[in-house]
Image (cartoon, rainbow, N blue to C red):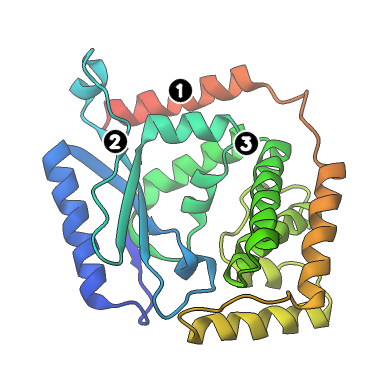
Amino acid sequence: MAVRAIPASMDPTVVGSIDRALDQLEHEYRVSIRLAIESGSRAWGFPSPDSDYDCRFVYIAELETYLSPWHTYDVLEPPISGPLDLNGWDLAKALQLLVQGNAVLIEWLMSPITYRRDTEFCARLRAVAEEVTDRDEIARHYLHLGNKQWALFNHSRSLKKVFYSLRPAMVLRWLREHPASTMTPMHLPTLMRQCELPADLSAAVAELTGLKSQAHEMGSGPVPAPISAFITTELDCAARTFHESVAHDRVRAQAVAAEFFQAEALTR
């Protein structure tokens, strides 16, 4: 069964363009798109009035494509057109990156904005993700991302970049507070609701989010103290908490992912 979740705030003309582009890609490349979601600031929970539409998707090619020695592409990325940015991964690439500790596929599975979702396929994919994912590797993914974006903010002082540091820091907090879970929410407000946070931090984030939702350009300036303290504390804590895993059985994870891929490719 396919499902769809599109907020009323999204431009129906752009959404229609996304639908047509996905149909065209399926026809032109003879692929089956099983999951297509929004993965930009709209899905993260802090859009600006002029935020782009960042559609990301997972597809399965025809079996003949995988059996051919001339199978050369594993990414579909049509040219950016206006506010529309589409990018999709072949299922094989998505699984390879997942096993390596890349958290992007988990984010796509957890996006609150869905253009297309084969629910049965996504349920199976989520089960595989939960089985093969190593929490420490996912945490280090967000630690690297958070440190990189925080350094960019400190260089540019662009308030927009605060959010790109804040969300990874909030994911790290969520992972610490949910030690049995790996499927971290993508949406910043959801992350915050599911964490124990001081009131002054929540108020500061709400104020800054409100400013971003109204301003085309936020400009530069100092970060509200509760947000700055939270980001630096969580990044420092994560560096001490989430170490390189020696227990993760990557060989077994690869076998589980390969079995899933083969089953899905054969039954497309």
Relative to residue 116, is residue 181 depicted above or below?
Answer: above
The residue beneath circle 3 is: 133
Q: Secondary structure at mark 3?
A: loop
- The x, y position of residue 19, in whole percent, is 21, 61
> Which numbered disc, 3 or 1, marks the residue that appears first in the sequence?
3
Label 1: few (<14), some (14–19) or many (≥20) C-alpha neighbours in 10 Å? some
Q: Which mark is residue 258?
A: 1
For residue 91, side relative to residue 245 (left or right): left
Question: Mark 3–mark 1 contact, CB under 8 Å?
Answer: no
Measuring 81% from the left and 82% from the top, which residue is drawn there? Answer: 200
Q: Nearer the viewer, residue 258 or 78?
A: 78
Front-lying residue, 151 or 112: 151
Question: Where is residue 181 shown, x and y percent of the image?
Answer: 70, 49
Q: Quadrant of residue 192?
A: bottom right
- Please state which of residues 147 and 157 is positioned toward the viewer in this rendering: 157
Identified at 60% across, 61% down, the residue is 164
Residue at disc 2, secondary structure:
strand
Residue 1 appears anywhere in the view: no
Residue 97 placed where, x, y %? 51, 33
> How packed is label 2: few (under 14 Cα within 10 Å), some, or many (20 or more)?
many
Rendered view: 62 above or below 141: above
Task: Point out the tag, 1 or 2, that comes first from the N-terminus.
Answer: 2
Q: Amino acid at mark 3?
A: Thr
Residue highlighted by disc 2: 60
Dots 1, 2 in contact, CB < 8 A? no
Q: Quadrant of residue 69?
A: top left
